[in-house]
Image: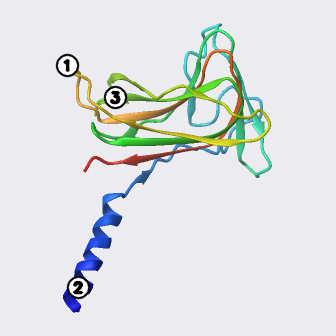
């Protein structure tokens, strides 16, 4: 009986470790942001100087010191990316966000080597928004595959984007890293 108990305990411990993930610190509630700013604190609005890029602004939520990001695009996608996080080829990144609006959004990963040298972009699939009135959660898992002829992956930046012709409000961004086993 003791051997059976020990086996079952080891099995459950293995299952817990096998699915262990790392919550990435990305300021997904946009804490510390200023109302009407074009981008949240600790995020970068990519291509911000491009005149075709969408308009964006920080708006208040019902939660103290938590904010949302309103984005309106017409001509081109408007991406926002996080600070870098350690990662390696074969890791998986799960990105989720609460959003409401019309149009489409997309998740991406900008990948870099261990010295922060750019390696490439990994794209998720376009996701159609389902409600203009109520927030829904959208999520995707992206596997960090290596790029032939480039340095090995050492870092990743989390990216969410409003695609062309989209009006959206984003809040509660989360990202988890599932290390390759």
Could you tell which of marks 2 and 1 lies nearer the N-terminus? Answer: 2
Image spot of residue 61 (x, y percent): 78, 44
Tell me the residue at 69%/38% (across/down): 33
Q: Nearer the viewer, residue 154 or 9?
A: 9
Judge depth for marks 3 and 1 and give the one in front: 1
Could you tell which of marks 3 and 1 lies nearer the N-terminus? Answer: 3
Q: Is residue 51 above or below residue 132?
A: above
Location of residue 126 by image quarter: top right
Q: Which mark is residue 149?
A: 1
> Please, which residue is most extreme toward the bottom here?
1
Quickly name the residue at label 2.
4
Q: CA distance from mark 2 to mark 3?
A: 46 Å
Q: Which mark is residue 50?
A: none
145 displayed left or right of 106: left
Tell me the residue at 71%/47% (across/down): 66
SS of the residue at dot 2? Answer: helix
Using a 10 Å C-alpha cutoff, classify the residue at mark 2 as few (fewer than 14 neighbours), some (14 to 19) or many (20 or more): few
Quickly name the residue at label 3.
112
């Amino acid at each position: 009986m003791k051997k059976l108990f020990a086996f079952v305990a080891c099995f459950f411990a293995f299952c817990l470790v096998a699915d262990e993930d790392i919550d990435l610190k990305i300021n997904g509630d946009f804490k510390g942001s200023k109302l009407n700013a074009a981008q949240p604190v600790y995020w970068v609005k990519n291509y911000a100087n491009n005149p075709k890029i969408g308009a964006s602004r920080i708006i208040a939520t019902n939660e103290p010191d938590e904010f949302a990001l309103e984005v309106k695009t017409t001509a081109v996608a408007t991406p926002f990316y996080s600070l870098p996080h350690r990662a390696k080829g074969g890791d998986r990144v799960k990105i989720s966000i609460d959003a409401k609006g019309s149009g489409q959004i997309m998740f991406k990963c900008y990948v870099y080597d261990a010295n922060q040298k750019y390696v490439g972009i990994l794209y998720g699939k376009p996701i159609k928004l389902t409600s203009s009135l109520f927030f829904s959660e959208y999520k995707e898992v992206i596997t960090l595959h290596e790029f032939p002829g480039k340095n090995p992956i050492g870092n990743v930046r989390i990216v969410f984007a409003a695609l062309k012709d989209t009006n959206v409000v984003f809040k509660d961004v989360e990202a988890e890293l599932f290390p390759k086993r």
